[in-house]
Amino acid sequence: MIKLFVGLGNPGPEYEATRHNAGFWWIDAVARTLGVQLVAERGYHGLVARANVQGRSVWLLEPQTFMNLSGQSVAALARFYKIAPEEILVAHDELDLPPGQAKLKQGGGHAGHNGLRDIHAKLGSSDYWRLRLGVGHPGQKSEVVGWVLRKAPLDERIALEQAIDRGVKAFADLAAGEMTRATLTIHTDKPPRPKPPKPAPAPAPAPAPAPAPAPDLPPG
C-alpha cells in the first residue's frame, strides 16, 4: 500500500506553471478529487493533507523547501508516521518521456533529478515508487535547467494534463497497493503521434514549347 503521496516542485508564483512543477500539479488534482485541502505544516516543511481512502489514512505532501531539498520534507513526515520507503510514491517531471506519457516504477537511480537525489539521501533508500510525468527533453544537456524552469506550450501542457488525469484515476489502486492495475491505467494511453510534415507542393509544369514554324516550300 502507498501511504504517502509526494509531488515535487518549487514554491512561488514564478514557478507555478513551469515543467518542474508537474508533481505539484498531480497532487493538486488528487486533492481536488478527494475533496481535501493542502495546508502548510512547518514541522514537515511542506503543504500537507490527510485523506481517508477505502478506510485507510493517506497523506499528500508538496515540499516547500525548493526542489533540491525535497528529501528534508519527505523524510520528516515519513519518519514521524513510520512510513517505509516502499509505502511512498513520488510524482515528478521526467525528461526521458514525451509530454502525454507517464510511467510507474519502483526503485532505481535518480537520473540526475535533484529532487529525487535529495530524497534518496534523506531516506537512505531508493525503494520508493515514482510516478514519472513526461515533459520531454530539450535535446541538449546544457539546456535542461532552462527547459524545466520554463512553461510548456499549450499543446504540451494539454498532453501532460491528460497523463496527470490518468494518474488521478489510478489513485485508489495506488493507495491499495494494486500496482499492476494502476500501471495499466497510467500506461495505457500513448501520446498522439506527431503529424507528418505536409509534402511540398509539386513544381508547376513547364510551359509547352511553341510549335516550330512550317518550312518555306519552293514554288511550283
Image (spheres, grey):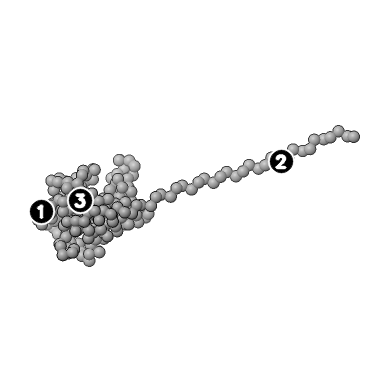
If you read the primary sequence from the N terminus, does the residue marked by circle 2 or circle 1 appear first? 1
Disc 2 to disc 1, C-alpha distance: 91 Å
Q: Give the x, y percent position of residue 136.
A: 32, 47
Residue 123: x, y in percent?
Answer: 13, 48
Q: Secondary structure at mark 2?
A: loop
Q: Please name the amino acid that badge 2 sits on.
A: Ala
Q: Which residue is denoted by mark 2 in the rendering?
A: 210
In the image: residue 209, left or right of residue 107: right
Residue at point 29%, 46% (across, down): 95
Question: Between marks 2 and 3, how big is the CA–CA gap?
Answer: 76 Å
| Mark toward the viewer: 2 or 3 | 3
Most distant residue in the top direction? 218
- Near-viewer residue (50 or 14): 50
Q: Secondary structure at mark 1?
A: helix
Measuring 23% from the left and 49% from the top, which residue is drawn there?
105
- Between the C-alphas of marks 3 and 1, the distance is 17 Å
Quarter of the image where the N terminus is located:
bottom left
How crowded is the residue under tag 1: few (<14 C-alpha within 10 Å), some, or many (20+)?
few
**Which residue is disc 3 drawn over?**
129
Q: Amino acid at mark 3?
A: Trp
* Residue bearing mark 1: 79
Select label 3 or label 1 by which is in front. Answer: 3
Q: Position of residue 38 (x, y in %)?
A: 20, 62
Q: Is residue 11 visible?
A: no
For residue 211, say whether it is visible.
yes
